[in-house]
Amino acid sequence: MSDASPKIAIQDITAPQNLIGRVLYFLSKMAAILGGLLMSGLIVMVVISVIGRYLFSAPIYGDFEMVALGTAIAVFLFLPYCQMQRGNVIIDLFLSWAPKKSQTVLDVVGSLLLAIIAAVLAWRMTLGGFNAVQYNETTYILALPLWWAYPFAILSFGLLFLTSIYTAIYDMIRVFRD
């Protein structure tokens, strides 16, 4: 039996066709991969530390500090890709009954709100990073400089801002086209 249903080609935001979308998608995907590699490294470190603690009473010194900094950095790195995949602002549970156009308009609003939040967080993280450098803030045990996490956060929030604006524009075009 052959499938008689028509094949409809739908352009998905996760596979942008224009140059700006492809660049944002690539950058956000690379950031997410970097975050995944970082998390994988942290997992291996924690396993080694736990085994070392259990078998030899020799954990990795300051492992929880490295996990805290590394997890924060990884989470920041995941955010732009999550937006490109439409995973950040989801209100489908409450609006599944609404017309598709209304849902898309609310997606635009959600993306724009997320863009504003990302811009404010990038700005505040920039100021916080300067303060961390100025006051030489470090972790308690390993004395790791706290400012190391700030560039990742600032770049991630900047990319999140751009991806949020892109998805808002993409959805707005869909509203007027449909």
Image (tube, rainbow, N blue to C red):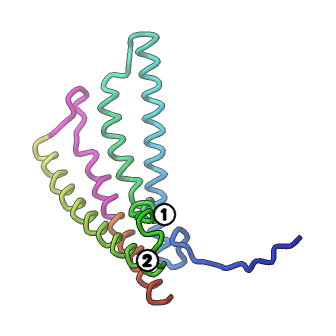
Query: Residue extending furthest bottom?
Result: 177
Residue 93: percent from left, percent from top: 44, 62
Q: Quadrant of residue 143?
A: top left
Identify the element where label 1 is drawn. Answer: loop
Tell me: 149 left or right of 163. left
Badge 2 density bin: few <14, some 14–19, many ≥20, Cα 10 Å = some
Residue 106: percent from left, percent from top: 37, 74
Q: Say which residue appears at 65% left-offset and 79% top-offset.
A: 9
Tell me: 114 left or right of 81. left
Q: Amino acid at mark 1?
A: Gln
Q: Quadrant of residue 46?
A: top left
Mark 1, residue position: 85
Residue 122: percent from left, percent from top: 24, 60
Residue 141: percent from left, percent from top: 23, 26
Tell me: 137 left or right of 81. left
| Distance between the alpha carbons at the discs numbered 2 and 1 | 15 Å
Q: Amino acid at mark 2?
A: Thr
Q: Say which residue appears at 48% left-offset and 39% top-offset.
A: 40
Q: Say which residue appears at 44% left-offset and 13% top-offset.
A: 54
Q: Magenta span covers which residues? A: 137-159
The answer to whether residue 95 is magenta is no
Mark 2, residue position: 104
In front of the other: 175 or 146: 175
Residue 45 against residue 128 in the figure, above or below:
above
> Which mark is drawn over residue 23?
none
- First-in-chain label (2 vs 1): 1
- Frontmost of labels 2 and 1 is 2
Q: Main secondary structure of the magenta part?
A: helix
In front of the other: 55 or 147: 55
Query: Residue extending furthest left?
Result: 135
